[in-house]
């Protein structure tokens, strides 16, 4: 599949939108997808980072003479964040469409507060399906899939903003976090131990909150119970030099870390983070790292409120109105309160498990998959799959069949009314087989995914399709040593009947 991302990074936008798109892009690339980024050349853009991570990039330039020719649109029709685009939406849409016109993409992924259904409709001939990543629920989209991982976000918030067919993936369990943030087990905080403080006010930190925090901490009397401080910033941080100067004045051991190779490693070594309630707040939740939240933008207020409501963080309010004395008192209190830190950590990790990318990929591939009846034209294809190395390791008949035996079996299955042989397709390419054999109480399922398409979550996609089909109840026999398949059926909602037997029955419909 060909996947195109339209997102931006800048001193105004920050790096968060690009960061989560890069996370999704890496996972899609690992599944064999072709990736292209389309970004605008804004102040603080991260073109070098995109290329460094191995992705193709088309960088859009803003031509002021062309912009002046565009039809002016009243502000009532524009998204609230339209100035972030750096040009009129019509100009951006036409430039994007030009990049897509030669070869329309299978999926266009849009992560941009300044773009809505008007832009999406203008570029529609350049994509087959649309995945939107959002946090605001403040404008309409033409999305086939919409992802909003904000805490407290519900599908109902988007029902009037997307088409009826749109799949809505809402809440922190769909957060697009890198794999490094999942599976971490933080030890309990011990009393009287000085804490290690992390300051993470976003990669750009355009308001220079980091330097302000360091200055206030340095003036605290009595000093807080802090052993060391780390400050995280990106290379595009506006006030990098000023933060560096402030770190050199600190009485507490302080280090400025620019573009760390592993943010998760930094979070793992910290006991408390002072950070913004943007997307990085969910990284801290997944790592069970307590946070003091400082809001620096209007679009962060929702996250701050919901994280506080979930008792996963404490909010200090908006930076512009933050009282220095209030901040110092709060930091002094929490730095000597291990029970509070442990409670915050426990609530935070329950909010986000770090596996959101897997769930989004599953939805994307499921939306792209279709099932059709097998025909005589599939005979040789299935033989190639059936005889591939390793495919029959856990089969009832481990020995690969001869071609003659396979042909006889294939023709017999197609002619049997008590059996159904189906082909799973991804973007019109055959990627797997499902077979249903009639039993006394239902249907036995067999699944085979083409060797070159394994590892993409397609077996789960096939099972999800089967659960909604007429072939229920479904029975499955899985070799006890085939742990991957055992987990697959368990996680798909199948009930274990014995060491190697599973069953799925569709839930009863509420008569109301």
Image: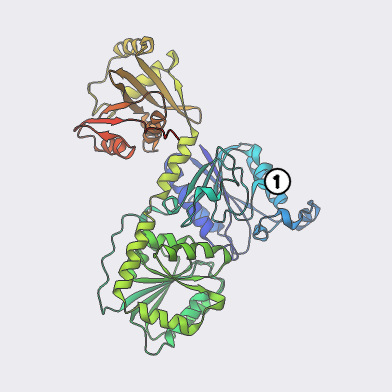
Count of picture labels: 1
**Percent x, y of residue 317:** 50, 73
Q: Can you see residue 339?
A: yes
Q: Secondary structure at mark 1?
A: helix
Q: Is residue 239 left or right of residue 224?
A: right
The answer to whether 376 is drawn above or below residue 319 in the figure is above
**Percent x, y of residue 407:** 34, 12
Q: Can you see residue 247?
A: no
The answer to whether 161 is drawn above or below residue 422 in the figure is below
The answer to whether 140 is drawn above or below residue 104 in the figure is below
45 and 153: which one is in front?
153
Q: Is residue 116 left or right of residue 237?
A: right
Label 1 crowd (10 A; few <14 / some 14-19 / many >=20): some
Residue projecting furthest to the bottom: 221
- Residue under circle 1? 94
Q: Quadrant of residue 224?
A: bottom left
Query: Which coloring applies here?
Result: rainbow
151 and 205: which one is in front?
151
Quadrant including the C terminus = top left
The answer to whether 377 is drawn above or below residue 79 in the figure is above
359 and 228: which one is in front?
359
**Percent x, y of residue 75:** 74, 57
**Percent x, y of residue 243:** 49, 78
Q: Quadrant of residue 334?
A: bottom left
387 and 465: which one is in front?
465
- Residue at 43% x, 33% y is 511
């Amino acid at each position: 599949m060909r996947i195109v991302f339209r997102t931006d990074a800048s001193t105004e936008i920050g790096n968060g939108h690009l960061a989560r798109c890069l996370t999704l892009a890496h996972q899609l690339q690992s599944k064999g997808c072709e990736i292209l980024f389309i970004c605008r050349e804004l102040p603080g853009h991260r073109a070098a980072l995109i290329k460094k991570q191995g992705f193709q990039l088309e960088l859009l330039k803003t031509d002021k003479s062309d912009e002046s020719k565009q039809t002016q649109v009243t502000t009532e029709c524009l998204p609230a964040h339209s100035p972030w685009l750096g040009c009129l939406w019509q100009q951006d849409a036409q430039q994007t469409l030009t990049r897509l016109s030669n070869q329309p993409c299978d999926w266009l992924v849009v992560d941009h507060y300044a773009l809505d259904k008007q832009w999406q409709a203008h570029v529609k001939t350049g994509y087959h399906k649309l995945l939107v990543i959002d946090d605001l629920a403040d404008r309409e989209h033409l999305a086939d899939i919409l992802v909003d991982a904000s805490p407290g976000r519900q599908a109902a918030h988007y029902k009037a903003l997307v088409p009826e067919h749109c799949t809505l993936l809402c809440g922190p369990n769909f957060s697009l976090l890198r794999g490094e943030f999942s599976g971490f087990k933080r030890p309990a905080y011990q009393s009287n131990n000085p804490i290690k403080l992390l300051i993470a006010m976003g990669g750009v930190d355009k308001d220079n909150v980091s330097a302000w925090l360091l200055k206030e901490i340095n003036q605290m009397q009595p000093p807080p119970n802090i052993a060391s401080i780390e400050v995280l910033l990106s290379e595009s941080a506006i006030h990098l030099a000023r933060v560096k100067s402030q770190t050199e004045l600190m009485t507490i051991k302080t280090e400025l870390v620019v573009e760390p190779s592993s943010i998760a490693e930094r979070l793992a070594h910290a006991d408390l983070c002072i950070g913004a309630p943007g997307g990085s707040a969910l990284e801290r939740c997944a790592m069970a790292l307590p946070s003091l939240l400082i809001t620096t933008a209007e679009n962060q207020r929702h996250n701050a409120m919901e994280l506080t409501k979930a008792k996963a963080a404490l909010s200090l309010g908006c930076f512009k109105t933050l009282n220095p004395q209030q901040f110092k008192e709060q930091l002094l209190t929490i730095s000597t309160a291990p029970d509070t830190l442990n409670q915050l950590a426990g609530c935070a990790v329950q909010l986000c498990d770090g596996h959101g990318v897997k769930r989004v990929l599953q939805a994307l591939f499921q939306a792209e998959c279709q099932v059709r009846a097998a025909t005589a034209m599939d005979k040789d294809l299935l033989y190639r799959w059936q005889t591939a190395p390793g495919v029959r390791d856990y089969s009832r008949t481990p020995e690969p069949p001869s071609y003659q035996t396979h042909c006889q079996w294939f023709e017999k299955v197609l002619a049997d009314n008590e059996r159904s042989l189906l082909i799973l397709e991804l973007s019109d390419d055959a990627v797997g087989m499902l077979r249903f054999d009639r039993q006394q109480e239902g249907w036995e399922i067999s699944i085979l995914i083409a060797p070159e398409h394994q590892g993409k979550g397609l077996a789960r996609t096939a099972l999800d399709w089967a659960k909604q089909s007429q072939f229920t109840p479904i029975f499955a026999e899985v070799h006890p040593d085939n742990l991957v398949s055992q987990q697959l059926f368990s996680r798909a909602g199948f009930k274990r009947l014995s060491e190697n037997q599973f069953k799925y029955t569709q839930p009863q419909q509420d008569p109301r």
